[in-house]
Structure formats: C-alpha cells, structure tokens
Image (cartoon, helix red, strand yellow):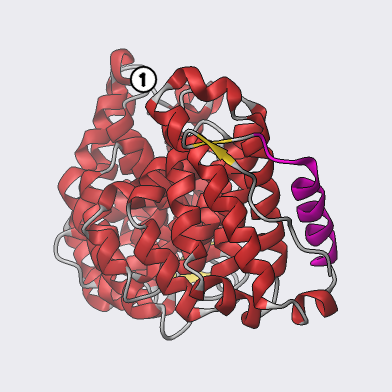
Amino acid sequence: MAAPRPPPARLSGVALPAPIPDLEALRALTALFKEPRNRETAPRTIFQRVLDILKRSSHAVELACRDPAQAEHLASSLQLITESFRCLRNACIECAVNQNAIRSLDTISVAVDLVLLFRELRVEQDSLLTAFRCGLQFLGNAASRNAESQAVVWMHAFPELFLSCLNHPDKKIVAYSSMVLFTTLNSERMKDLEENLNIAIDVVAAHQRQPESEWPFLIITDHFLKSPELVKAMYAKMSNQERVALLDLTISRMAGDEPLTKDDVPAFLSHAQLIASTFVDQCRVVLKLTSEQHTEDEEALATIRLLDVLCEMTAHADLLSGLQAFPGLLERVIDLLRLIHVAGHDTTNIFSTAGCVTGDGNVSNMVEGFKSHLIRLIGNLCYKNKENQDKVNELDGIPLILDGCSVDDSNPFLTQWVVYAIRNLTEDNSRNQDLIAKMEEQGLADTSLLKKMGFEVEKRGDKLILRSTSDKPPQE
C-alpha cells in the first residue's frame, strides 16, 4: 500500500507548497480504504504519515487566521487537508482497529482544532468549505459505534465546535456537525447540554431551517425527548417559533410508526405535565387572534400547537390518566371553548364561522381546527372518567359542545369530534343522558342534529331516554 511522502522542506517557519506526489498518494489511499480488506490490513504507520501531513498543512491555516492577507496562499494546503480527512474518514468506516489507532495518535484533537480554525477564516472559497465538511465527516466516522472515540470527540469538540457549526450558513456543515453531535451524545452527556442550552436550541433551529435533514430530527426525537429536564429548560428559553418546531416533533414522535416504548413513557409523562401546565397558564392568549393586528401572533400560534400535542397525548393510554387528573385542565378547555364561541358570534373575526370556512393560509387553518381540537380534548379527558363527565355537566359544557356543532355544520371534522365527545360524556352516565334528552324535549337540542350524531330520544313512560342508534363506538 502506497504511503504519503515525508513533509516538505520549510523556509523561515512557513511551509513550502506541498509536492504533488503527497496529494496523489493521499488520493490513492482514500480510494484503497473504500475496500474493507484494505482498511482491515492498514498499518499504523500510514495514519502517522497522514497526521504529519495534516499537522504541517494546518500551519498555513493558522497563519491565514492571524493574517487574512495570507488566505490567498491556502490552496495547496487546503487540498492536502481535504484529502487527509477523506483518507481518515474512509479508514474509519466500520473498522474499530483503525478508529483506535487514529485516536491513539491524537488525530481527533488536531482535526477539531482545524475545524475551529476554518470557522475563523473570513474567506469565501469552495475549497475551504470542502475541507470543513470532510473534517466533520471524519469526526463522525471516527466516533461511530466506538464509545472510547465518542468520548474523545466529545471532550475536544464540546461545546465550541457545535456552537460554531450548528448555525453555519452552509447546509452540509450544519448536517455533518449534527451527525457528529448525534453520534457522540448519550444519556450522561445530556447534562452537558442542560448547561449549554444554546446548543440544544441551535439543533431545533437547524431542524426549522432544514427539515429534510435527518440528523437534527434524530437528535431531538432520539435524545432530547428522552430528557424531561432538558426539554423543560429549553422550552423556557426558546422563541415561540422554536417552541412550535419542538412541539411538532413531539407530535411526530407520538404519532409515528414506532410506538412509545415503556422506557419512553416516563419522559413523556413529564412532557405532558409541562405542556398541560403551560396551556392552562397561557391558553387565553389565543384570543389575541380575534384582532386583525394580531392574526399571526406567534405566542398564540404556539399555544394552539400546545393543544394539538395535548390531543395527541390524551389519545395515548399511558399518558391519558395523568392528564385527566391534571388540575384545572378540563375547566380551562371548557372556558376557552366558551370564550371563542362568544368571540365568533360577537364580531366577525378569525373564530367566526365565515372566517373558518373561507379563510386560507396557515393561520386560518390552525384556528379552524382549534375548536375541533378543544372538543376532541374534552372527549378524551372524559373517556371512561365519571368525575370529568360530571364536571363538564356542572360547567354547562354539554350545551356548549352541542351548540358548537350546529354553528359550523359545514365543518365535518367538528361534527365528528362533537359525536365523539358526546358519546364519552354519556357513556354509563345517566345524568348527562337525561340532560341531553331534556334539551331535545325543550327544543334546545336539534333532533335532526342528534340523529346525525347517532342519537335519538325515546320516551318511556314519564322518562326520556337518550339512546345510541349505532352500537359501533367512534374512533379517535
């Protein structure tokens, strides 16, 4: 296997241009290391030679950082650095022996130092970006499935490298630095993130900018959402836009193809408490949306997303009971439903029927589903829960729910959730059944609407009975 040549001569402390054979030798090694058998038989001396080239080439970068005028002389050094990183990157692919040899030579610290120097260079050169990207790829491969190398990368890279790279304008640098973070994170290192919240928030911001990138997504779903302490600290410090992004990923995790495991449930129980508490405290802020000046209020939109998460959480059996018993949650949901119901009648605004049906754009769509989700949440909170069923009755919530359906008959989703809520409110609850039957007799409940919802009132002697016309329960 060919090896790079010795370092070139030096003149007055400045590296001379690298001889072409060094670059050719590195390229040959990079190609050879694409094959597993070549990786497995590589001698340690090869990696020492590559490290030597990396070290001497880094001097030119250091000089350019001190004196920007020297940046124009970086071309040959950047070529060598790039190819050295490619060579090392390939050598580490599924090869713990090479990972260990490269780590023992202290190559990781040299690579991290170079990456940090790249961030300091104020030059726009494609060759610099390429070297930057390859350096991050090497660090990711060096740490992959190797606990000792992960610890060394973390020790040298955290927090400066992530603070420098996660908000970089180059998408690939953001993606590759996210890959390094994902690869090196574990449960013990989450404490470090709690002390450096800006890194965690930068990951969420990276996901906002690049939703197609898998690494920020995986960091959040596979690491952040398993740490209630981190999520709570992040949420308090985030912007409302960042909160919406985090809440969206929480929904994505719960509604995804992979169900929550037993190990996930304790963390999500804690998330549920945080989200319910925040909603109870802030939910009235959505009323700002009734004003034309605040139709895109970010705090209100974040609160709407809290409701979406609560609906998803109460549809999960392991999370439901805790939320059913959460102090003030059911009362606040009914109160808010009443307030937006009144607001939609009093003036023409985004909560009015016309606003829901004819509005276009994200804000209108979010608000259109808001009433449906309030009713859905009431239904979930009352599922097989007599105490909450009775509480809705005491708060005059049943007429409010029925009236909400008749106001916007053109919204089929609203009707479906009203049906679902009424079924859960009346299941094994004769008091609530009697109330609806009396409402129908007094003309306060539309008979045709009840039939549409799958109910009818039957008179047996002096007693009115509300019964279902279908034995099949509705689905969540």
From the viewer's side, name the closer residue of 187 and 123.
123
* 19 lies left or right of 58: right
Which of the pair 417/194 is nearer the observer?
194
Residue 443 shows in this picture? no
Residue located 53% across and 51% down the image: 55
In the image, residue 282 lies in the stretch drawn in magenta:
no
Callout 1: helix, strand or loop?
A: loop
Q: Position of residue 201 (x, y in %)?
A: 34, 47
Q: Residue at x 30, y 73 (%)?
A: 269
Q: Is residue 93 left or right of residue 299?
A: right
Residue 398 x/y as whole percent: 30, 55
Q: Say whether residue 139 is left or right of residue 78.
A: left
Across and down, in percent, residue 268 comes to 35, 71
- The image quadrant that residue 292 belongs to is top left
Q: Residue 178, relative to residue 304: is it above or below?
A: below
Q: In which quarter of the image is residue 457?
A: bottom left
- Magenta region, mostly helix, strand or loop? helix
Based on the picture, tell me whether residue 28 belongs to the magenta stretch: yes
Question: Badge 1 is on which residue?
Answer: 349
- Which image quarter: residue 330? bottom left
